[in-house]
Amino acid sequence: MGDALDRLDAEITVCRRCPRLVAWREEVAATKRAAFRDEEYWGRPVPGFGPHRAPIAILGLAPAAHGGNRTGRIFTGDRSGDVLFAALHRAGLANQPTSTSSDDGLTLRGTRIFAAVRCAPPDNKPTPAERDNCAPFLHREMRELVPDLRVVVALGAFAWAAFWPAARAVYGVAPARKVPFGHGTLWRADGAPALLGCYHVSQQNTFTGRLTPGMLDEVFARAKELAGLS
Ligand code: SF4
């Protein structure tokens, strides 16, 4: 099982299926942000991160241009990641509260993090065609996690929407009617992992207080409960 995920990770990192995103990720990597001008940017698709046996999955939108697209690890090296990994550490799901580079020693417990789209998109907005191009990677990754996966935490409405085709493809289940995204919304069905909604850890949400550390703590406490992790 682990080997299949390793192979998938390797396959993802060389994908060039979306011309607009390939051009953008490489342009950002070449021009860089001033603060990181001495760094070598990753500039490629960003695979999932975390153990291969994970009862909790965290599903994000896409890597950040100067975060994952720079460091090569999802939610690593940006403000969103600062908030996310601090919360995972408080929840006992990460060994350290920070995530600054791909060799910073961070490890996760029972938790795998991945994104619906694996390349950084301009303005954090992938097109529907790019989302659909990348969906098979998400479905394959979820398929590899099947034996252990109990709950998927969807960060924001885009990730929430990306879950349903994955649930259909991997588990053969679909809700009878549309389930709107909401922070704290929980969807459950027999034979599939639970889906738990959480506002995205973006600066727009965390700087404005729409998403607080306390709200994240509640989400991860609930996720742990659903996953049977104490
Ligand atoms: S977004 Fe996904 S499908 Fe498109 S180029 Fe990146 S890895 Fe490939």
Image: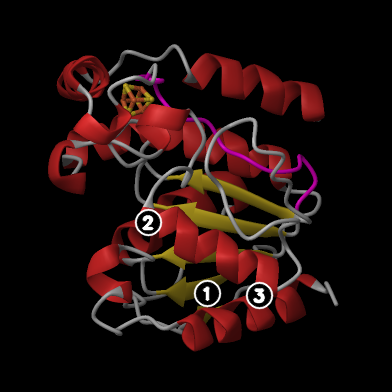
Q: Is residue 44 left or right of residue 114?
A: left
**Which x, y percent locates residue 79?**
37, 56
State how the image is colored. secondary structure
Q: Secondary structure at mark 3?
A: helix
> How would you rate the neighbour count of disc 2 (Cα within 10 Å): few for under 14, some for 14-19, many for 20 or more?
some
Q: Residue 44's spot in the image, x, y percent?
A: 38, 19
**Disc 3 residue type (three-letter):** Ala
SS label for mark 2? helix
Q: Is residue 190 left or right of residue 33?
A: right
Disc 1 residue type (three-letter): Leu
Task: Classify mark 1: residues with Cα within 10 Å, few (<14), some (14-19) or many (20+).
Answer: many
Q: Magenta includes 53?
A: yes
Q: Does residue 224 appear left or right of residue 74 in this picture?
A: right
Q: Name which residue type carries label 2.
A: Arg
Residue position for label 3:
223
Closest to the observer, 207 or 186 = 207
Q: CA distance from mark 1 to mark 3?
A: 7 Å
Label 1 close to label 3 by CB (< 8 Å) = yes
Q: Which residues are magenta?
A: 41-54
